[in-house]
Image: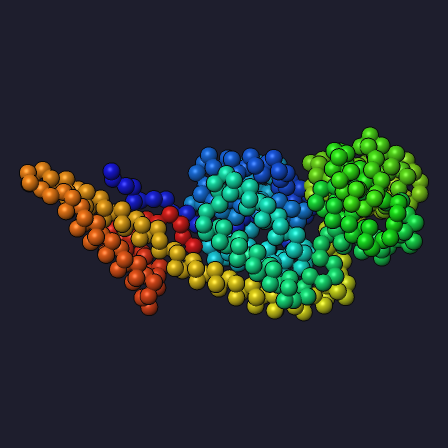
Amino acid sequence: MVHNHMLKTTYFYAIGLSYKKADADIRGRFSMDDTSKKNLLHQAKEVGIESLIVTSTCNRTELYGHAEHPYQLIKLLCENTKGTIEEFQHVAYIYKNQEAITHMFRVGSGLDSQILGDFEIISQLRTSARASKKLGLLNAFTERLLNAVIQASKRIKNETEISSGVTSVSFASVQYILNTIDNVSDKNILLFGTGKIGRNTCENLVKHTKNEHITLINRTKTKAQEVAGKFNLLVKDYANLQEEINASDILIVATGALNPTVDKNCIQSKKPLLILDLSIPKNVNPNVTELPNVSLIHLDDLSQMTDDTLERRKEFIPLAEKILEDVKQDFNSWLETRKFAPTINALKHKLLDFKNAELETQRKKNADFNEAQAELISNNIIQKITNHFAYHLKTDDTSTDDSIELIRRVFQLESTTHV
């Protein structure tokens, strides 16, 4: 059997868009629910993508994966969202190899979060990685990288105070309510949507407002009942949404709908109503602000509000970055010893092809050819040769990349990934 040693060369990319350049409307066009993420992964597998992690949160949508060219990942993203390639080009970022590794570390450690120190993204990365692994789309490199990012995140959380105070959009929304509304404990609060952000917001509401007038509504009532059961809160049917909005002083919308679920036609009450839209895409139609009694705040507005706690957390950025660099250095050390493995493996197969061709020649030339003895001797020689090359790559002072490139050229090899 002759092996194909001229394999495709792929690189590790991080492609995506975030709150830094993309507003809520654009992020909404590129946002993905669980179904679209699953479809994207299946499509990636069909087109031969080796490894891929897909994340979509309220402030970013990103793909981390191996590809020959970043366009392969961009195409997957645009085909599974409402966003176009032109829109992506205006607001996106593309990182390759070490830049992509660094980006993943910064995102997972909360240093790139919309609210500094927000660690919710690490659990989302974990969940996304599990989905990829189920489909065989998580290679050893990406899994090792993710574990290193998780380790850095834990250390930063435990060894610094960068996560003290407001650490998430859900907490920021509750803080805004506390700072804006007098006598919060007496107000009627309606939480519409009990997904991850909704659940976290609910917990913070109960903990910090001391309010006993909190009502939950979710399209799937059982999910709202699960959350309400923990805190002894009231649950109403989705059919009662309009009635409950008009009975509320504060409405928090955290649904995952692709189109607005609340607009001005839902509101007949004339009393003051504060609406917080924590959804991406936006789930509250901006036309509600045409009503004089309504105030609308979106999560992008919340993230821009700073306080003393945020300023204090900034003091811990240098320490957090040092921890991040320590863990990243360990990962890169592992990567350095691992990256020549595909070349050594390809070399071994090349030598085996030489061996098999030569044995076939000798078999035809010599009637009394001792095939078993020749097989044993040649395999031992091949093992010794590959061991020597591996030892050289591990210990030689010259650049590993230069040595790998030389071996590839001499033996006409190509490894599968570059980092």
Q: Is residue 398 left or right of residue 56?
A: left
Q: Is residue 107 left or right of residue 263?
A: left
> Number of callouts in the render?
0
- Looking at the rendered image, the quarter that the N terminus falls into is top left
Q: Position of residue 162 (x, y in %)?
A: 67, 64
Taking the spot 61% from the left edge, 65% from the top edge, the residue there is 320
Toward which corner of the image does residue 268 lie, by quadrant? top right
Q: Position of residue 356 (x, y in %)?
A: 19, 42
Q: 232 and 107: which one is in front?
A: 232
Toward which corner of the image does residue 243 lie, by quadrant? top right
Q: Position of residue 75 (x, y in %)?
A: 52, 39
Q: Is residue 228 left or right of residue 73?
A: right
Q: Position of residue 322 (x, y in %)?
A: 57, 68
Q: 190 and 88: which one is in front?
A: 190
Q: 274 and 381: which one is in front?
A: 381
- Looking at the rendered image, the quarter that the C terminus falls into is bottom left
Asked if residue 82 shows in the view, the reply is yes
Vertical placement of residue 24 versus 111, above or below: above
Q: Is residue 59 left or right of residue 180?
A: left
Vertical placement of residue 250 versus 262, above or below: below
The image's colour scheme reads: rainbow
Taking the spot 72% from the left edge, 68% from the top edge, the residue there is 312
Taking the spot 87% from the left edge, 37% from the top edge, the residue there is 244
Outermost residue toward the top in this view = 239
Asked if residue 265 shows in the view, the reply is no
Q: 389 and 312: which one is in front?
A: 389
Taking the spot 14% from the left edge, 42% from the top edge, the residue there is 371
